[in-house]
Amino acid sequence: MAGCALALLPSAWTHTSAGPRLRTTADAPAAEVAVVFGAGLWNGRPTPYLARRLDAAVELYRAGKVKVVLVTGDNSRTDYDEPDAMRAYLTGHGVPDARVVSDYAGFDSWDSCVRAREVFGVHRAVLISQGFHIRRAVALCRAAGVDSYGVGVSDVHDATWYYGGAREVFAAGKAALDAVFEPEPRFLGPKEEGVSRALASLAD
């Protein structure tokens, strides 16, 4: 029983840290930046799960609640480019290309959060992901220094959803270790001005 309790402590941490900061697209607070986490591609296009995250970003942008969308995902090989696929989806749904910023080294949630702060200079954001992941995302980004609120998009409870929910029990353990030890991302790189340029252009 003690072992089970210890195993569940990381999940309790993510729920406690993120619980008061979860919102819907309707009641999400205004923030300059929305961060959309990658969720895979099918034949070069966003999976249905990722498409629903992007739809939420489009809704927030159209409502004037966010000004810039930072898309963060995996581009570790030439034939797999989540950020560009996400950008294409957003621009195809009416978000101006100049309002989309790409993070090509968002290899996991911790890397995405740290890079949002350290590389792109994001200090406050609305995060968008599925409900089973959003608590961990908010907890990690807060630990990385980003004042975060989360929008968890709904989905059909299919096999992928149940797998994602079960995976979170184990992923929460890694998240807790990341928050405590603050490892450097797999690739940090130099600072980028994409977010600040996009915001500055709104004042021109």
Image (cartoon, rainbow, N blue to C red):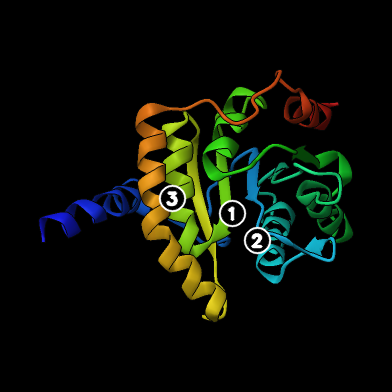
Q: What whole-number distance in Å separates the C-alpha atoms at marks 3 and 1?
A: 11 Å
User: Do the residues bearing badges 1 and 2 touch, measured as CB atoms within 8 Å?
Assistant: yes
Q: Amino acid at mark 2?
A: Arg
x and y percentages locating residue 172 in the rendered image? 38, 50
Q: Amino acid at mark 1?
A: Ile
- The foreground one among 69 and 107 is 107
Secondary structure at badge 1 equals: strand
Q: Is residue 8 left or right of residue 143?
A: left
Q: Earlier in the sequence, mark 3 or mark 2?
A: 2
Q: Is residue 62 left or right of residue 144?
A: right
Around disc 2, counting alpha carbons within 10 Å, would you say few (fewer than 14), some (14 to 19), or many (20 or more)?
many
- The foreground one among 9 and 57 is 9
Label at residue 136: 3
Q: Is residue 80 left or right of residue 108?
A: right
Secondary structure at badge 3 equals: helix
Q: Earlier in the sequence, mark 1 or mark 2?
A: 2
Q: Residue at x 41, y 67 (%)?
A: 166
Displayed quadrant of residue 155:
bottom right
